[in-house]
Image (cartoon, rainbow, N blue to C red):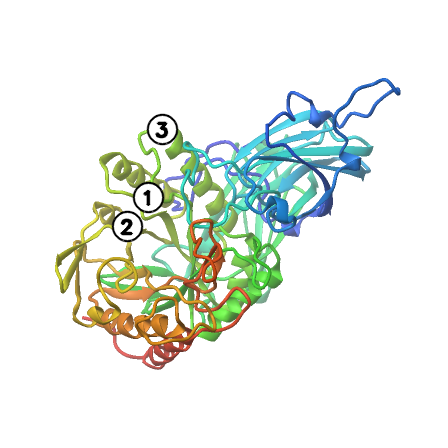
Amino acid sequence: MRFALLFLFAASCFAQNPSPLIANPGSRMGISLDGAWNSIVDPYDSGVSSRYFENAKPKSKSDLIEYDFDRSPNLQVPGDWNSQRDSLLFYEGPVWYQRNFSYRKRPHTRTFLYFGAANYLARVWLNGVKLGEHAGGFTPFDFEVTGKINDGENSVVVAVDNSRRADGVPGIHTDWWNYGGLTRGVKLIEVPETFIESYAVQLAKGRGDEIEGWVQINGTRMGNADAATIDIPEAHLKHSVQFGASGRAVFRFPFAAERWSPENPKLYRVTISGENDRVTDEIGFRTIETRGTDILLNGKPIFLRGVSVHEEAPYRGARAFSEDDDRTLLTWAKDLGCNFVRLAHYPHNEDMIRVADRMGIMVWEEVPVYWELDFQNPAILENAKAQLHDAVMRDQDRAAIIIWSIANETPIHPARNAVLKSLSEYARSLDGTRLISAASDKWREVDPTNMALNDPLGEYLDVIGLNEYIGWYGQHKPEDADQIRWQFAYSKPVIVTEFGGGAQYGLHGDSATRFTEEYQANLYEHQLTMLSRMPQLAGMTPWILMDFRSPRRALAGIQDYYNRKGLVSDRGQRKQAFYVLQRFYMEKAQAAGAPPRK
């Protein structure tokens, strides 16, 4: 992969680090490679030594080639392999993908092979030549193929390996399905010889009446390029700024934007142009900040009525990848009364963020620094930083995102503290306009009615995230929550990022019987009573919107390898607790005009 030159501009709060190619791929000319790909399952990882990447064919009857993509079964891309074949439901290891395609070269055009995501390690070959590798299952990557692609027939081969790794992010242990494959779209993207590689356009931090950002070009004319122009036709605004020697143009200019909010998700059509290239985007403008224990959207306190969401497809038990999947999940969240979602525990697909932009739903976006990792291994920090960087570069112009989360439920340890401190600083260097948070479950019981969270991670955050499962895990009953009080070591806004309990849709009984809808609804009633008294509470994202697959959940006849903590079943059926939380959120929304806490 190729990267832009590092260029420091101290006055800007945006990243000046190398950014991945290519920003806003949906706006680019290209050829989709989605659809049926040939596939070979490779449990012994013999494909490299057997040279599957060559896609060779016998030249005579006596030639021995012990694979044949053309005779192998298909897998649909985008999609995970686990849900496409029963035999691959639990499979972890390498699977080889191959596809033939035709291409006609165009003069003065550069071509890139773009992947929305591949879980987890992807190795890519074009016409037998290795393009490179990418580690990380939830962020995009691409390779320039301008000098490697044939004018005519081509073959692309991708080895995808979803094996869990001790040096990976996430690591060996998770609590979601390890879906493998080319889980998001693949396409060829065409751009001019010198093109707009990336850009950021947002309201300036602390100044709601100014826009700031940058435009980065890539190509041979970087030092001699024309000016970059930012055009917002609806506002009759056009601003130009010269590119520097590194190909970066940094701008700041007045703009009295109509603010984006859940009630008014206003998006402007913005065109960024320069050096014979232009990119059009839809961008909303809003401010997000904290004041004491309040979160302020556009300068006014707001309560985040949220829910956690996994990237699990409604109705079919698979990795979500389509805009229809995204809209269904977010519509359910809005029906619940949400103005906010926590996208757990990794970056979801780009369309999810854009749909949230259009629907007016604020977003917590997270990188999969999850549970126990070898925080003493420098590779862990570098891997996490790379995934954070790519998520920020992809989504930094989405008004919906108000929080970057750097971790979930990590153990308190000096090495962990140092890594998360570094990640928080890195997140701010990438994007200083949003809040930084992480979810911690490292609270302690002071006595039976007093709980305290004093995770030192709180020092590095703008917003404290608390995961607690009183009434589900541990010795407490749901009713005990009525007497429990909370205290926090840091005077910052608190989001209760997880609480809840499991229920199988349609299983009924008394409220003391586990996994009944009545137990889950009763738990929510007592939780909401407790949380309403919680000091510093600025929002909540209970666990979770919809039941999702997890290999940890093996209780036959109840879980059947699904985490049943959803308010909605995996078939879209609403449980009793859905309506308990919906009623609470309706009351919160009606009280939204109340004065902020003192």
Query: How many angstroms separate mark 1 from mark 3 (CA)?
Result: 16 Å
> Residue 452's quadrant in the figure?
bottom left
Check disc 1 and report the residue beneath it. 424
Check disc 2 and report the residue beneath it. 461
In percent of the image, x 21 and y 45: which residue is there?
456
Residue 80 horizontal side relative to residue 439, left or right:
right
Q: Secondary structure at mark 3?
A: helix
Residue 94 vs residue 277, the one in the foreground: 94
Residue 162 horizontal side relative to residue 487, left or right:
right
Residue 5, relative to residue 458: is it above or below?
above
Alpha-carbon neighbours of circle 2 within 10 Å: few (<14), some, or many (≥20)? many
Check disc 3 and report the residue beneath it. 378
Residue 154 horizontal side relative to residue 52, left or right:
right
* Badge 1 or badge 3: first in the primary sequence: 3
Query: How many angstroms separate mark 2 from mark 1 (CA)?
Result: 7 Å
Residue 140 horizontal side relative to residue 421, left or right:
right
* Badge 3 or badge 2: first in the primary sequence: 3
